[in-house]
Image: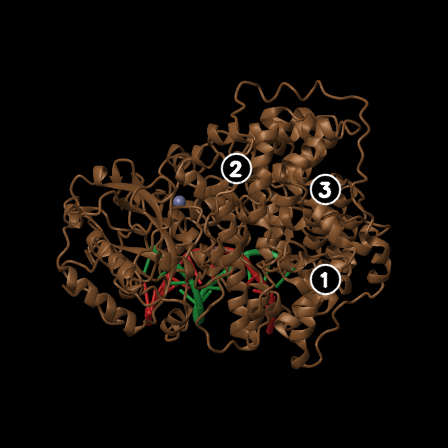
Chain colours: A brown, B green, C red
Amino acid sequence: MTSVSLPNTGTSKNGSPGFLDFKLKRRRLSDILTTSSIPGNTSIESDVQSNSSSESGYISYSDGNHGDRNNSPDESPVYNISSENSPERSSHCEKQFINNDNETGAPTSNSGINIGQCRSSLFSPPPYYANTINKMHVGVAYVGIPTTNDENQLDGKDINNKFKMGLVPVMSPMSGFIPLAINGLSGVQIPQELSKGVQPVFMTSMPNGFVMTSSGPVAVSSPNRLSNDRKPKSVSSCGSDRSGPTSKKFQTKETESEFIDHYTNGTFVYLGHLGGLKHKVKNVNESDVGGGNSQTVKEDETVPDMTPVSTYDNKYPMVCGICNDKATGLHYGIITCEGCKGFFKRTVQNRRVYTCVGGSGNCEINKTQRNRCQFCRFKKCLHAGMVLAAVREDRMPGGRNSGEVYNLYKVKYKKHKRREETRVCKERVAQIISRPNGQQLEINPCITTDKNTKPVSYPGAGYHGNNNSISDTRQMYTTGQNSKSSVYTTDCVNDSNQTDVTDKWCQKRNASISSMGQAEHFKTQTCVNRDSSSQLSCTYGVSQHKKKLCDEKMENLIYGYGSSKNGCVHGDMSQSFVPRKMFKSGRCYDNRDTGSSTESSATNENCSNNQNVDLTSNLQKLTNTNTPVTCASTMKDSHAILRSTLTQPDTNMFFMTSGSNNPCLLSSSSGEQSVISSSYMSPQEDPKLTSLDPRSRYLLDCLLDCDKILDITDLYQRDHLFPETKDDVTNLLCGLGDEIVGKLIQWTKRLSFFKEIPLDIHSQLLSSKWHEILMLITTTYKAVHGHTLNGMTLEELYTNNMNHLKGCMECLFKKEFTVEHLETEIGEMMGIISNLMYSFIKMNLSREEHVCLQVILLLNQCDSGQNDIINKIQDRYSSVLSDIVTSHRPDQPNRYAELLLFLPQIQTASALLIQSKMIYIPFFLNQ
DNA sequence: TTAGCCTTGAAT
DNA sequence: ATTCAAGGCTAA
Ligand SMILES: [Zn+2]
Ligand SMILES: [Zn+2]
């Protein structure tokens, strides 16, 4: 059975399409396990060389019914590993696939254990979609994991008893499927030989498109249409009938609201629609009747557009508000790419009704995987404020939409100069760093500060009461950083309805927070990065296979533009789990209510925070060295400089490295060592802990023990981490991703509540929170390790951070950066980070508090009702934190609330980090 | 189906 | 005359 077609030829003609049934996978897995043929880095590189455009792989779906849109129920869909949007193919890999396929023979189509992509392929798959395996991809899929080793039993029958659902990293068919060790799943082991090599871990927030329910694998459903199944009428652009209203998109108002409800599902209110609008026709007096939910738009008064058309656009391209792809302008109300523009148009014109089959309606949408779930993509479109009414019923091209429609636009036509953006950005940074307390930080959703422009209320922007609301702050990020957002005006929504956000996290803490009057800030910021839980594949997804990176590509590498290719995250699972004394206290303290002891504790105990040795006598001197790394004038020196920068803390301002086994590292600083060791004082030696509630003490002990895994500061202490070539830079970044993922996985698996969490929740948590954890580690590191400010101001800290980062980046990328440039790119984020660092140091954040915050952050759910288990566990650790604070800092009654209020900022910074895609920043800052 | 490129035409 | 956001077309 060779259904694999050659490039540009038809696929799966009539016959059974190529596919991988489970037996095949098993066989490949067996092959892998016995022959250790897992491709290592070398193998991967050689394999992907022939591919010039690699995107994150996924497992595609082919209905085997090429050209026929009718999916007969008898024809079970089959799935094929494929690559997305990749016309080019590697004949090498393809051949392999064909061979394997042939080995297997014809599939039993209803075996069902096929891995599928979320794509619902009612359409005829283009040739390049099907049966193509051309990339060395890594990915994760939920597949059935056999519970028996007897391959003869794996015949596809009675699958529910023979398989368990499991998360399995997948690579290209060459390597088959490599099981991730999933706790509790029988038959899944990580072979020893795999643990040393490339262990692909590609974290996704969803099961990568495939649905394996408790009742077995679920076939990908078809996109349905609403009652009116009219084919889209293609109106000739020069047709004479175009002026007349040709048809109704929605037969009735009920149908339209049904259409909208299908995507909002009550989770947010969509107001970006009007009934039956046409485009603006010349000479029609429309007088901007602001009926109902529309409001008159006051056209821009001032600010002529003096934007010089320069290379600026190329350097700072707009990004799509939906998928972060390069945007081409304002489309249907927001800045989007051509793809999302077309997708929105097609969906609205044809009233397509999709279904999320791969996830639970919250699939990640980015450039790489925007086509995996149409439902979630369109939902995001609505959520982001794309205006249904902007899709014209009469299909008349050109012109401008009516004011009524325009009033629904979240982003207005160009109004501002770009120079304004830089100024605003700087102002924001100054604003951020000028605030002594982080919790006072206010995120203004309105990027523009132009006083002359009165923000226009945007009725459609009122995504009230939305748990997973992509707030308008997100919109700001979308348009405000990498985009030439200044060209457009984002409406500043100060909708009071926003306070309806019912984030449980907010609710749970409002009581303690309310005294500080910060609840609103908290709420707003909590939901900043709902859509930013990006995949590692994107953030670290720098093309490994490129042998040459032109300067432009290098730019991508640095700033992450379009770098979301070829998810190459190889989680290093080699760190074997060494059982430590997780249960050293030996008893289970389960007889107390954890929440009860918080109120009643000490009153007069003098909290001695003097355990931190004042090590900063030299700090002032060090900070005076300003730029620690003058950019390597010669490539030759850059390694040494970078190494020096990264490994010698005292030449590097205030960043102290610890936890490293590198002897020269620790020997470079003298007095700091004692601080390090003291900060690692084991809990039982700490007299402070004795006053804790026993259960809290126990939980805390576990956390402290687990936390040792998460020391990421040694990631740079490797000889190979000082790149010679750009490819090495790529590898470095990938490696960093690998490491942090591996550490996070190890960490979560060691957490005492790990077994309480369902598998899918676990993976969701990891994939959506890893960057927040990383940000927390980054910002708390110095405080936790006993640094003191020693007179350093926040401004100095910020400047030092920026300079340090600049130096590191220049050495890493062998490219000069201007401070202005960096501030434009990451100034806001660095402001927040510095602010957090400063605050944590200033308040002497303890390691005990840090580990609690870490878990609370991990377990935070934006959607309140999502998972009670998670909420309970989170409450548990909230109580621990409360206990700690109450007993250790009785003089600071607000400290608990203050600590929790840092979390939204962590999320904000994390969201900015993800958006910047410069994920390496934390690794630099921790050095 | 997707998404890049093209045409259109009111607004500027 | 130019802009730029609509719709259209079509290769992949
Ligand atoms: Zn897009
Ligand atoms: Zn989805």
Q: Is residue A906 above or below residue A191?
A: above
Q: Are marks 3 and 1 on the same chain?
A: yes
Q: Position of residue A221 (x, y in %)?
A: 28, 44
Q: Amino acid at mark 1?
A: Ser
Q: Secondary structure at mark 1?
A: helix
Q: Dot 3 falls on which chain?
A: A
Q: Pointer 2: residues within 10 angstroms few (<14), some, or many (20+)?
A: some
Q: Position of residue A877 (x, y in %)?
A: 58, 31
- What residue sits right under mark 2 in the picture? A582
- What residue sits right under mark 3 in the picture? A442
CA distance separating discs 3 and 1 = 41 Å
- Can residue A448 be seen at all in this image of the molecule? no
Tell me which residue sits at (61%, 27%) in the image: A879
CA distance separating discs 2 and 1 = 31 Å
Q: Amino acid at mark 2?
A: Met
Quadrant of the snapshot with the N terminus of chain A: bottom left
Q: Secondary structure at mark 3?
A: loop
Q: Amino acid at mark 3?
A: Glu
Image depth: mark 3 or mark 1 in front: 1
Q: Dot 2 falls on which chain?
A: A
Image depth: mark 2 or mark 3 in front: 2
Q: Position of residue A157 (x, y in %)?
A: 15, 42
Could you say which is closer to the camera, residue A198 or residue A480?
Answer: A198
- Can residue A640 be seen at all in this image of the molecule? yes
Q: Secondary structure at mark 2?
A: loop
A284 displayed left or right of A264: right
Q: Is residue A182 above or below residue A715?
A: above
Q: Is residue A784 above or below residue A714?
A: above
Label at residue A667:
1
Q: Dot 1 falls on which chain?
A: A
A386 displayed left or right of A21: right
Q: Quadrant of residue C4?
A: bottom right
